[in-house]
Image (spheres, rainbow, N blue to C red):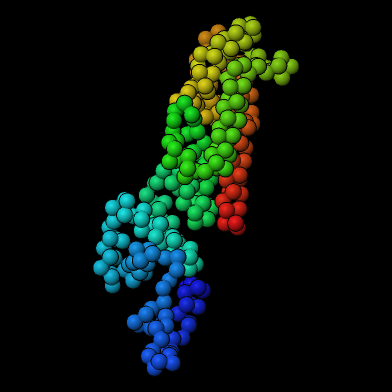
């Protein structure tokens, strides 16, 4: 089950030693003086034993039907013991328990770093990047301490780069496809289409991209454009413009992916140090 535990339980019981004075020396590993397990608190060991022996211990009830706070405590205790002694069952159960609690992303990232749960990093970083705003004051001083300067710097750099890309995109309406590639269909006044497109972009799209509280994801803009009724623009030209837009590749996704990779590198470096 666990190589470290197998080794611990493989140690033979201590043989009582008699000192020069004829009295027994109080060595560890006897019933009267058990070995002290370093790195584990009694509460952590209690939760581990309750999980492992389930109905045989009174604390099992708490493990079966705990409150959310207690569930988090149990999950963290199990993860602590599971990681310390490399017990797959405890780690797996702890992860399942904590994932089910839908903890805030900051807490998830904190646990991911502490216990090297790399599969939690991506989702947490994706949730945290949009929250990086000094204006909103999303992170209090306690949050800043929990995240640490390296992670904060990665998150804010990604957020700033994404914001810059969005501002550049929003500021100027994308050009309509050039004449030589566009079949204009029934369009007899393409200049009118271009004016209508620019107005519609500024009034109905740019504002959504730049919205301070709830900006529209760039990947959703194609569908939003498609649903617009743009007066003064023919349907054919509208469709062509939307098709051109949806063929765009945005930096946003690769910026998020770089931030995820950066946080992962940092977490792995923390494990090595
Ligand atoms: Zn046109």
Q: Is residue 193 above or below residue 111?
A: above
Q: Is residue 116 above or below residue 47?
A: above
Name the residue at 48% across, 68% down: 85
Nearest the viewer among 123 and 108 is: 108
Figure quadrant of residue 156: top right
Counting labels gives 0
Figure quadrant of the C terminus: bottom right
Tell me if I can see residue 51 in this picture.
Answer: no
Nearest the viewer among 72 and 241 is: 72
* Residue 2: percent from left, percent from top: 48, 72
Name the residue at 64% across, 8% down: 190
* Residue 60: percent from left, percent from top: 29, 65
* Residue 77: percent from left, percent from top: 39, 60
Nearest the viewer among 264 and 145 is: 145
Q: Is residue 43 above or below residue 144?
A: below
Name the residue at 48% across, 65% down: 84
* Residue 139: percent from left, percent from top: 45, 36
Name the residue at 57% across, 56% down: 271
Which residue is at the far right?
180
Nearest the viewer among 49 and 20 is: 20
């Amino acid at each position: 089950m666990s190589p470290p535990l197998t080794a611990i339980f493989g140690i033979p019981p201590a043989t009582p030693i008699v000192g020069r004075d004829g009295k027994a020396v109080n060595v560890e590993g006897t019933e009267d003086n058990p070995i002290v397990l370093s790195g584990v608190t009694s509460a952590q060991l209690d939760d581990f034993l309750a999980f492992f022996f389930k109905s045989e211990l009174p604390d099992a009830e708490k493990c079966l039907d705990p409150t959310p706070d207690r569930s988090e405590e149990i999950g963290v205790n199990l993860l602590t013991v599971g990681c310390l002694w490399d017990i797959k069952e405890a780690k797996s159960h702890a992860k399942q328990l904590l994932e089910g609690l839908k903890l805030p992303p900051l807490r998830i990232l904190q646990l991911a770093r502490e216990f090297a749960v790399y599969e939690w990093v991506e989702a947490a970083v994706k949730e945290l990047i949009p929250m990086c705003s000094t204006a909103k004051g999303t992170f209090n001083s306690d949050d800043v301490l929990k995240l640490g300067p390296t992670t904060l710097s990665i998150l804010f750099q990604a957020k700033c780069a994404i914001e810059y890309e969005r501002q550049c995109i929003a500021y100027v309406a994308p050009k309509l496809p050039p004449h030589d590639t566009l079949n204009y269909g029934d369009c007899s006044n393409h200049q009118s289409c271009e004016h209508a497109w620019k107005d519609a972009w500024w009034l109905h799209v740019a504002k959504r991209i730049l919205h301070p509280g709830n900006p529209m994801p760039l990947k959703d803009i194609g569908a939003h454009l498609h649903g617009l009724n743009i007066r003064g623009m023919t349907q054919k030209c509208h469709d062509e413009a939307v098709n051109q837009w949806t063929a765009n590749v945005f930096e946003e996704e690769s910026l998020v992916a770089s931030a995820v990779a950066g946080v992962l590198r940092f977490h792995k470096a923390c494990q090595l140090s």
